[in-house]
């Protein structure tokens, strides 16, 4: 382990890494020192799809210079192997988002039928709008009937055998034409994932172009359908997020309270944990154990879900999950699926924390299993809270909670942006478009994705995003990137004055929004697609997402879900940069296609940049190029829709 190395820009994280070392507890930061990434696998040059391998088709500099090539035993080329690996990542990412979505649909149908107490239809307007998108009859129908019909229609999307996915119809017309022309309009969500597994089996698809075409079908099925269904139905059941005040970082843990952290991705149980943790019966029980009450906080994307809808504080992002336990103050960490480190169990054994797994899909040896029963949801949640309360008196080590807790505003759904900019009676993206056209806002950036132990925690996110907003680019963020922004104080309206360029700051101050808008968890990247579509449909900025002055980035990505997200952004027309590492660099041919050739088909393309300032420069360059193509590169008269102007219009 490297004693002097600084692993994070976040003080609380550094403080807890130091404590982990004093306590003799190994974390991901130590393991990253001990084990370097495999130089062959990390660039996609290792094929282990049959037992004659793994075949490594990496080339030395000398081989490359001599023009030598290398294939697997079956003759598979570097481009075939890199493309197979890449689209298997897309399959895994699509499957993760979409399987989450399937669970949401099942609960939604049961809730609509009134079979599970505690869940209901919270947003009827969104229900009606979505029902219309999905061709569900609404005239003269009761809410319950509409909800059941919608749920059943969504359920069919996963296993659809004939026809095309419905969700993609929301995209701009021009985009839909592109998908038709390229033959990538997905059929069933599951079907596209399965077909990737088939095509990447030994001896099937051996052309990187058709392999990535299949990857695109799966990614589009994820972004415009799987992920989007989960976001929309969660909004309908639990409420569409509106701006909410909260706090973030490990300092949200409380020494005098029972601390329960929810970690993972699905909001189904955590919604009930919010209710249970605030139940007077639970507070009274906590008091019998010497605590002031129950303090529920979140981590990763489950945390983002309950932050957005209930203002529950966020304890941190991906790389902080072990560290939260190392505070010695966490009675229970409640996990469901995705991005949960197996090491949590070992770390929790060094303290008193109970690691509780709640999904039959996500088991961890040694952890306490308390599978969530949605048909008795509140009781499931209360049982978990009780276990946590009973554990309060078992705190054994020194409790050390960092002081860092930073205020933030989260909850910028696409509907909220509409309303905030346009006002209640004329909700519209027009003011945003106007301000992009007049140059006050230079462009839009989606900055999303994970933390990665191979790069300094949060550092790339923050350098990139600060540079973007300083240059008047408004940033939409989700997932662990959003948490990084929150901890650095970028999610408050005041941040506009401190960090944003004059044009963006003026818009933010007039409307009262931060320069960086927290739109939710990673499945909520679908909100960014819809917001981009709304900007196109509002007019004045071209006819397609690819024409917008916009770009995307995942500067610290690590999960397969990020690759699925990146591919659906690229196939939706977005210039998308990934940092840290890129999993196809072993094949020049395939990488050249992803970074250049693909643009001729979709108007979007991939890029890989390690330095965050360079990422910002390239994104801004792309935005400026789009402005020029739209003929809005010169400053024009600025129209700012402040409150007075809005009243005038009304
Ligand atoms: Ni997204 Fe959320 Fe975080 Fe990455 Fe993992 S928690 S779904 S995958 S690490 S942003």
Image (spheres, rainbow, N blue to C red):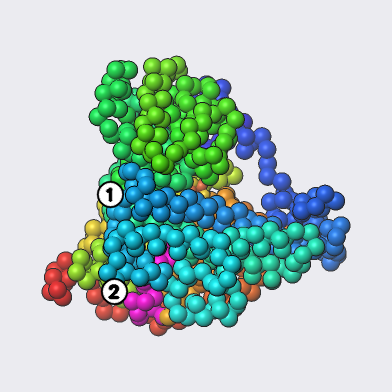
CB atoms of marks 1 and 2 within 8 Å: no
Q: Which residue is mark 2?
A: 430
Q: Position of residue 86 (x, y in %)?
A: 66, 59
Sequence-first disc among 1 and 2: 1
Residue 532 colored in magenta in the image? yes
Residue 504 location, quadrant: bottom left
Measure the C-alpha gap from mark 1 to mark 2.
24 Å
- Seen from the viewer's position, the closer of residues 374 and 205 is 374
In the rendered structure, find residue 199 and report the number of the disc placed on it.
none
Element marked by disc 2: helix
Q: Residue at x 51, y 39 (%)?
A: 359
Q: Residue at x 77, y 64 (%)?
A: 204
- Seen from the viewer's position, the closer of residues 596 and 157 is 157
Left or right: 142 in relation to 88? left
Q: Which residue is mark 1?
A: 244
Q: Position of residue 368 (x, y in %)?
A: 51, 28
Element marked by disc 1: strand
Q: Is residue 176 above or below residue 570?
A: below
Residue 590 location, quadrant: bottom right
Q: Position of residue 266 (x, y in %)?
A: 45, 46
Q: What stretch of residues is rendered in magenta? A: 526-542
Q: Residue at x 52, y 81 (%)?
A: 177
| Residue 572 seen in the current view | yes
**Picture quarter with the N terminus:** top right
Q: Residue at x 69, y 71 (%)?
A: 209
Left or right: 192 in relation to 467? right
């Amino acid at each position: 382990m490297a004693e002097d190395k600084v692993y994070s820009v976040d003080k609380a994280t550094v403080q807890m890494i130091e404590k982990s070392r004093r306590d003799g507890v190994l974390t991901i930061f130590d393991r990253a020192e001990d084990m370097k990434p495999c130089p062959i696998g990390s660039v996609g040059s290792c094929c282990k799809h049959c037992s004659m391998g793994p075949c490594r088709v990496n080339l030395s500099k000398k081989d490359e210079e001599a023009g030598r090539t290398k294939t697997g035993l079956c003759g598979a080329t570097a481009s075939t192997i890199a493309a197979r690996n890449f689209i298997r990542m897309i399959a895994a990412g699509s499957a993760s988002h979409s399987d989450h979505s399937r669970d949401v649909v099942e609960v939604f149908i049961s809730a609509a039928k009134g079979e599970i107490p505690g869940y209901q239809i919270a947003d009827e307007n969104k229900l009606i709008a979505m029902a219309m998108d999905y061709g569900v009859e609404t005239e003269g129908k009761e809410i319950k009937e509409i909800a059941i019909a919608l749920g059943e229609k969504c359920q069919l999307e996963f296993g659809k055998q004939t026809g095309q996915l419905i969700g993609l119809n929301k995209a701009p017309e021009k985009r839909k034409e592109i998908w038709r022309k390229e033959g990538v309009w997905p059929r069933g969500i599951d079907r596209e994932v399965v077909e990737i597994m088939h095509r990447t089996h030994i001896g099937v698809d051996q052309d990187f172009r058709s392999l990535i075409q299949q990857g695109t079908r799966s990614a589009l099925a994820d972004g415009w359908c799987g992920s989007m269904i989960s976001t929309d139905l969660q909004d309908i059941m639990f409420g569409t997020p509106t701006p909410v005040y909260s706090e973030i970082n490990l300092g949200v843990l409380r020494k005098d309270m029972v601390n329960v952290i929810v970690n993972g991705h699905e909001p189904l149980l955590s919604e009930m944990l919010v209710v249970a943790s605030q139940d007077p019966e639970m507070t009274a029980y906590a008091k019998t154990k010497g605590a002031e009450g129950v303090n529920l906080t979140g981590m990763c994307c489950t945390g983002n879900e309950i932050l957005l809808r209930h203002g529950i504080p966020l304890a941190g992002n991906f790389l902080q999950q072990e560290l939260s336990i190392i505070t010695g103050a966490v009675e229970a960490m409640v996990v469901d699926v995705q991005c949960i480190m197996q090491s949590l169990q070992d770390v929790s054994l060094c303290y008193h924390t109970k690691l509780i797994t709640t999904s039959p899909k996500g088991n961890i040896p040694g952890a306490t299993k308390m599978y969530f029963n949605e048909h008795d949801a509140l009781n499931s949640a209360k049982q978990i809270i009780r276990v946590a309360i009973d554990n309060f008196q078992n705190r054994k080590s020194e409790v050390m909670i960092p002081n860092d807790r930073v205020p933030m505003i989260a909850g910028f759904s696409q509907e909220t942006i509409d309303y905030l900019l346009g006002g209640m009676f004329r909700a519209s993206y027009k003011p945003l478009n106007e301000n992009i056209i007049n140059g006050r806002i230079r462009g839009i950036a989606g900055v999303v994705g994970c933390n990665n132990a191979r790069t300094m925690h949060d550092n790339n996110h923050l350098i990139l995003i600060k540079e973007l907003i300083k240059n008047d680019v408004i940033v939409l963020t989700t997932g662990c990137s959003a948490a990084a922004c929150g901890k650095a104080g970028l999610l408050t309206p005041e941040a506009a004055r401190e960090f944003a360029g004059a044009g963006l700051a003026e818009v933010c101050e007039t409307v009262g929004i931060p320069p960086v808008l927290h739109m939710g968890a990673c499945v909520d990247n679908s909100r960014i697609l819809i917001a981009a579509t709304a900007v196109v449909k509002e007019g004045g900025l071209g006819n397609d997402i690819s024409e917008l002055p916009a770009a995307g980035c995942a500067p610290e990505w690590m999960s397969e879900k990020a690759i699925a997200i990146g591919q659906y952004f690229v196939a939706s027309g977005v210039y998308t940069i990934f940092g840290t590492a890129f999993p196809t660099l072993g094949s020049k041919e395939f990488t050249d296609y992803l970074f250049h050739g693909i643009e001729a088909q979709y108007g979007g393309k991939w890029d890989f940049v390690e330095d965050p300032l360079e990422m910002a420069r390239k994104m801004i360059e792309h935005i400026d190029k789009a402005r020029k193509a739209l003929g809005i590169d010169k400053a024009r008269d600025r129209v700012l829709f402040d409150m007075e102007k809005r009243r005038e219009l009304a």
